[in-house]
Structures are given as C-alpha cells and as structure tokens.
Image (cartoon, rainbow, N blue to C red):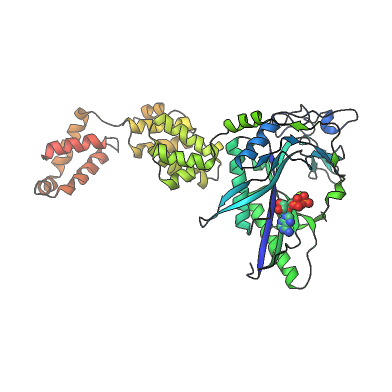
Amino acid sequence: MNADWEVVIGLEIHVQLSTSSKIFSGASTAFGKPPNSQACAIDLGLPGVLPVVNQAVFPRAIAFGLSVGAEIGALSTFDRKNYFYPDLPKGYQITQMEQPIVTGGSVDITLPDGNVRSIRITRAHLEEDAGKSLHENFPGMTGIDLNRAGTPLLEIVSEPDLRSPEEAIAYAKSIHQLVTFLGVSDGDMSQGSLRCDANVSVRKVGATRLGIRTETKNINSFRFLKRAIEFEIERQIALLETGRSITQETRLYDSERDETRPMRSKETATDYRYFPEPDLLPVLFDVASIDAIKATLPELPQQKLNRFVKDYQLPPDDARLLASEIALANYFEEVARICDEPLMAANWVRVELLARLNREELPLVQSPLSATTLGSLLTRIKDETISGKIAKTIFTALWKQETTSVDDYIQAEGLSQVTDQDSLAPIVDKVLAAHPQQVEEYQAGKTRLLGFFVGQVMQETQGKASPGQVNALLLARLGE
Ligand code: ADP
Ligand code: MG
C-alpha cells in the first residue's frame, strides 16, 4: 500500500436471524432444500396476499442492539425498497429505512498488534432476503430459486471508521462473534448466514473529505473480504495516481479471478422510491419488554474469557483462544465438566484436538471426537486407569473411528495401567537386578538415576505402569 493514501472502509453486514420460519410468512428457512420448495404465496408476492411479521425477529435484533450499546427505537417501521430484479418477485424488498430497530452503538475490535479500536455502528435494520439466480446447469438461461426469499436478515451498517483491510476483517469477525454468542444467528458463512458489502474509498493523507467509494457486494468469507478490499484499494490508488477518477458504483468480487468488477452504477435512495410499507403496522416496544431482553442476554466473549481465567485458572492466552468461538467454548466446558480437570481439558482441547482439526482442515462441528468422548478419555487419565501417553494412542484410535468407546478400547487392548504393587514389584526387582552398576551409583549419591529406573520399568510394561506407583516402589527398594 502507498503511504500517501489513507484507506476508508464502511461495512454493511447481513446477518441471517436464527428463526425457523421467514420474516413475513410461515415458510421454513431450512437450508439446502430442493429449489422453490420453501417459497409460499407470500414469498412469491402473489396478488392478494398480506405479510405478517414473525415476532421472533424482534428480540433477536434488540439483543444485538443492546449488546453494542445502541438505542432501541420505541417505534419501528417497515418500508418498501423498489427495484427490478428476477430474484425479487414482488418488485420490492420490505426493509426499514426511516425508523430502524437499532440506532448507534459501537463494537470494539482487537487488532493483530493488540491495539483496541472502537468502531461506530450507524444502524441495524430488519429486512427480507431475496431469492437466488442460478446460472450453472442452465445454459443460455437463468434459474430462479426463491427458497431464500423472505429469509429474515439484520443488516448492520458501520460508520466509515475502518482504516485497513485488517481492521475490516477484525470488525467483521467481532460481529460474527457477537451474533453467534447471542445466538441470534448461526453465523454459518458457507450457508450465507453472514454476508458483507464492503464500501471502500481512499483519500490523500490529511484530507478531510471522504473520497468517492465503491461498494463490493455479497462477500461470504473473511478471506474474500480481505482480498476484495485489497484489490479495490490498489485499483483506486492506481486510477487516482494516473489522474483518473473513481466511479461510484456497485461491484462484485470474483474469487476465481481474485478481482472486483463493476456490476451496476450506484443507485441512490431516490432510485429506490422508498415509501412506508402499507401492509404492515408500526411496531411499538415498551421499556419493560426491552428490559426483559436485557435481563436475559447471554454471556458475551469478553465476559466468558474473564470467567475462564477466574473460575478455571486458565492462562489468559488459552482462555482467549477457548472463549473465541461459542462452539469451542461450549465444547471445552463440557469436557472440563465431565473430567473435572479444567486445566487438563484446556490443554487437550488446545494441543490435541485443535491442532488435529487444523491439520485436517476440519471445523469443530465435524470433529470425530465429541466433547463427551474426550471427557471420558480424560476421566481415565485422572483416575489413573491410563497414562497421558496411552491416552494419546487412544485419542488417535477414536479419531480414526477404530473405536467409539474409551472404556471398551482400554479393555479390549489391555491398556489399563498396572497400578497394583503385586504385579509391579517383580518388574521393579527385575530392572534393579539387571542394572547392578547403576544401583551402586545411585546408592553412592547419584539419585538422578531414579528417572533411568522409572524409564526401564515403563519400557518393560509398554508404558502401562503407573508412574506414581513405580516411583514409590523404587524408592522403597533403593532405600531413600
Ligand atoms: P448506501 O445505503 O447508499 O449504501 P450509506 O451512506 O448508507 O449508503 O453507506 C453505506 C456504507 O458505506 C456505510 O457502512 C458507510 O460507512 C459507508 N461509506 C459511506 N461513505 C463512504 C466512503 N466515502 N468511503 C467508504 N465507506 C463509506
Ligand atoms: Mg448499501
């Protein structure tokens, strides 16, 4: 990037709210169903139908607003945004223009260098999603799938406060974290549950007016978001430095060619002929119902991190990692609860599980080991049935799905630790008898040879001896 230019970014993030039916109809929002099997007369905009608001969208939008310190309007209204597009059967989208449900607020982002910045939120409003145009498998034609039409969205608009692609990613990740912790969205980006429009402009360092921006639409991964913004920055700077100007327009990011290209020239609000939706009444929220939502807000990322440090005595870096994603945090807590050893649970989740998932590029939901299974494995370390080393081999067997039950596997493979003194004593004696030289040296004061003897016993028992028992037996035999 060029030191003469300052980058300015504002994001519009569309979050799919986690309701089972659509925002203005009773049709299901389930993902991946056959095309057009989940679009009812209301979603299709057939004549004579009337929308009815799904009440479940309000507490979700309000929970988001409260968690970012926004103002929740006492009155919220819907408007029509008119435009013509094949995947928009009504010819308009119901959205909120004049009186959005959420106004203001801010989100703190932590940058890779540890600095924290506060990013202002302009507003967040409810709206319906459009359908989808399908080009594959339709040579010379366009297929239309209206299953998504009417899916409830919360569009979260930021102020142009972001100053680099890294800040934009950190902000988008914070929003993702927030909505998944709140449970207002599943945040599954591969299914389109969180999509970003990136507004990007550049200006000379020191300039006070914002530059002309482009808006790159519908980006569905953090990596693509970063690439799209980087591409736009370079493109805009190159144009301005050669005396050309930026056209205010809507662009799209093509991940295969790793570039953005123009989609249409930028519409302004007047192009959309916004007007109040006549088929829906304004919605009123009283203080009591907002307070009730406030009282039931779940634990947010920072609070969870603090609790992990305080209650489980986790090192802050481990706590930060384990509290970064709601699914991971829940997994860890379940393992810790089952084995009742939080530190051991944290280590195994971090070192064994996450490393393995990363290596095989699997998300946590596809982990071959459930939290219950990992918890039961760690329980067997804790009660000294197995050593940590044997536990790692069992972990691998579970991972490869050679077994599903920790206890059955321990039994079938004869892996339980030899803890009874009667069977360990002869092995200890054998080891001592085989190394008279070392016994003599030990008794002459070279006590660090104890580790050597323990190692020999472990080898004899293929790692199955309980180290504590072996130590005790050796000390007794060698005379402390
Ligand atoms: P529209 O609704 O037409 O897309 P808005 O004024 O509501 O336009 O802005 C949408 C987004 O664009 C917001 O996130 C805002 O912060 C961002 N934005 C506005 N002006 C600029 C600019 N010059 N450079 C970068 N982002 C901008
Ligand atoms: Mg916009």
Q: Nearer the viewer, residue 206 or 238?
A: 206
| Residue 410 point in image, percent of width and height | 37, 29
- Which quadrant holds the N terminus? bottom right
Quarter of the image where one finds residue 477: top left
Q: Is residue 201 above or below residue 357?
A: below
Picture residue at 80% right of the left edge, 45% below the top: 135
In the image: residue 417, left or right of residue 432: right
Q: Nearer the viewer, residue 179 or 382?
A: 179
- Count of picture labels: 0
Picture residue at 14% right of the left edge, 47% below the top: 438
In the image: residue 191, left or right of residue 316: right
Picture residue at 38% right of the left edge, 27% below the top: 412
Picture residue at 66% right of the left edge, 34% below the top: 60
Q: Nearer the viewer, residue 102 or 223?
A: 102
Q: Is residue 110 visible?
A: yes
Quarter of the image where one finds residue 209: bottom right
The quarter of the picture showing ligand 1: bottom right
Q: Single out the residue that lies furthest toward the right.
A: 47
